[in-house]
Amino acid sequence: MAESEVHIVRALQQVGCEVPEDMTLASFDAAMLRSAIYVCLEKIKPEIKLPAQITDDSLASVKFRVTQQLVDIIKGCGFIGELGYNQLLYPSAKDTRGVLAWLVERLPRQTTTTTLSKAELFRADIQAALKTWTQPRLPLCLRRSQLPTPFEAVTLKMSKPMSQQVTPDTMLPSIIESTRVFSQKKKTVSSKATAERLQDFRKIIMDGLNGVVGAEVPEEPAAEQVTGELSRLEQMAMYQHEDAVIETTDTDGDLSKADVDTLVAMSGDLKSRRADLAATALAAENKRSAFADEIETAEKSIAEQARALEKLAVAQEMAADPDVDEKLDAQEAKVSGKLERMQSEWKEAKDALISDLAAVQQSIDTMDSELEATAEQAKERKAEARTLLETLRQKEAAMEQAAGGTNVRESIIESIRDLRRSVAKQLAELDSVKVEVRERKIEYDAAAEKSAASYAAVKEAMSRPGKAADKQAFAELARSRLNKVHGVFKHLERLTENIAATEQKIVETERLAATEGQAAGEVPVESVARDLEALRAENKALMEQLKARQE
């Protein structure tokens, strides 16, 4: 198992996840992954309300909804990798490693030092001591007012960007003024405090080294040594500069030109030494990175050698064991017996499967024979049904022939219905004749008016004196008009004869229908009788009008 996986598993165990020590991230299933996500999210953001956990028996819709809510919460916390509900329902080793590594990195750090090792405690003490050295040192006379020393003032101004730095003309008066204020206190500072602080720092380092003998080696010794050396050199230069300033200060508090030159030279020397130390720190960092890579490679090599040694130890143990042959024979016999049992079980299962297949085939053959027999029976029953149907038809025909005498009444009723239909048809024809008679009557009236006018014109023309030819023409015109009138009269007579014949035919039909209806036990329909009476009355009126016209 890789070192990163070890750190992830230990971090999950510390926050409360039930994960075995030797379990890898590739062996995490979906339930374990979701459980770890729940625990980590509760630690990262306790104010978030997490959805209820799902089980393997949950519905598919519930699983989809809950996992999608978890994905939204994780992405809301800042996760930018590829993550969906599929990665939480069917996780792979890559997905599990990515999600858990991100969650472990976001876990809140513990502020207590109860779980720190001796090496970590030693490193913390050194860092605390270095912080006290990096703070700007002030003499006792200036600590109350918190005024900067001349060296601090120069360093502060020179640390600004070039655009904000002052020129030498403005720098020297400020340095002189700061030195004058500093010298007015008339306090001399000895190097005793510096020696005591160095002695205390050495004591802390020695105590730490004595306490971590046999303990874990710090991970980054080179960077810490360079940082400590850098801080120490800066402080020593600062103290030397302060002592030099104090010793060279005159009673009036003014600095000579040589003192100012010395101060500027020391400042430049300090800058160069800072640059050298920064380069040394960068080189040390590069060496530390290379050293870390070499350590990782060595750890892998040591792990491989350890595995090889384990295999070699097992082989040597087996070779040194006098009963190794017996153990191997027993193991081989055990494996052979297990193999024989598996072969016998497989053979039994194969025989059982063959017998089951034979039984199934027999069942299929039986079903096929039953289906064939059923089809034959269906054919026979169909033939019997056809024979029975033919017999029924013959019996029905015989019964109809036998019941011929008893169907006289039905035939009479049917003939009456036919007669009624013919009467209705004749009535329709009579209506059409009546319409034609009305049209002819209109034509007759028009012809009569024309004939009367022509007769009057002829009579008037004949009474006037004139030529014989004109009189002859008028006489012929009168004859033609009279011939037309006679033609109309003849046509009306034919129509009258047709109406009379139709009426006679209707009367005969009615009488026949009445006779047959009485024979069949029925009475003629009253509506037909009323229609016939109305038709007779209308024909009678029409005949009277025709006679009046003829007269």
Image: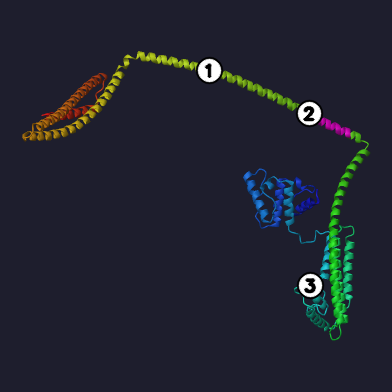
The image position of residue 356, as x and y in percent, is 69, 25
Q: Which mark is residue 117?
A: none
Q: Which marked residue is nearer to the observer: mark 2 or mark 3?
A: 3
Q: Secondary structure at mark 3?
A: loop
The main secondary structure of the magenta stretch is helix
The image position of residue 319, as x and y in percent, is 92, 38
Q: Earlier in the sequence, mark 2 or mark 3?
A: 3
Amino acid type indicated by mark 3: Ser
What residue does disc 1 label?
379
Residue 543 shows up from this direction: no
Given the current orientation, which residue lies at the most extreme bottom position? Answer: 252
* Contact between labelled residues 2 and 1, with CB atoms less than 8 Å apart: no
Q: Which mark is residue 159?
A: 3
* C-alpha span from label 1 to label 2: 54 Å
User: Is 453 located above or below residue 296 in the figure?
Assistant: above
Q: Earlier in the sequence, mark 1 or mark 3?
A: 3
Residue 259 shows up from this direction: yes
The image position of residue 265, as x and y in percent, is 86, 75
Q: Secondary structure at mark 1?
A: helix
Q: Which marked residue is nearer to the observer: mark 1 or mark 3?
A: 3
The residue at 55%/19% (across/down) is 375
Taking the image as shown, residue 47 lies to the left or right of residue 522, namely: right
Range of magenta residues: 328-345
248 or 114, which is in the foreground?
A: 248
User: Is 9 located above or below residue 436 in the figure?
Assistant: below
Taking the image as shown, residue 285 lies to the left or right of residue 98, namely: right
17 or 81, which is in the foreground?
A: 81
Residue 521 lies in quadrant: top left
Residue 42 lies in quadrant: bottom right
Mark 1 crowdedness (10 Å alpha carbons): few <14, some 14-19, many ≥20: few
What residue does disc 2 label?
343
Amino acid type indicated by mark 1: Lys
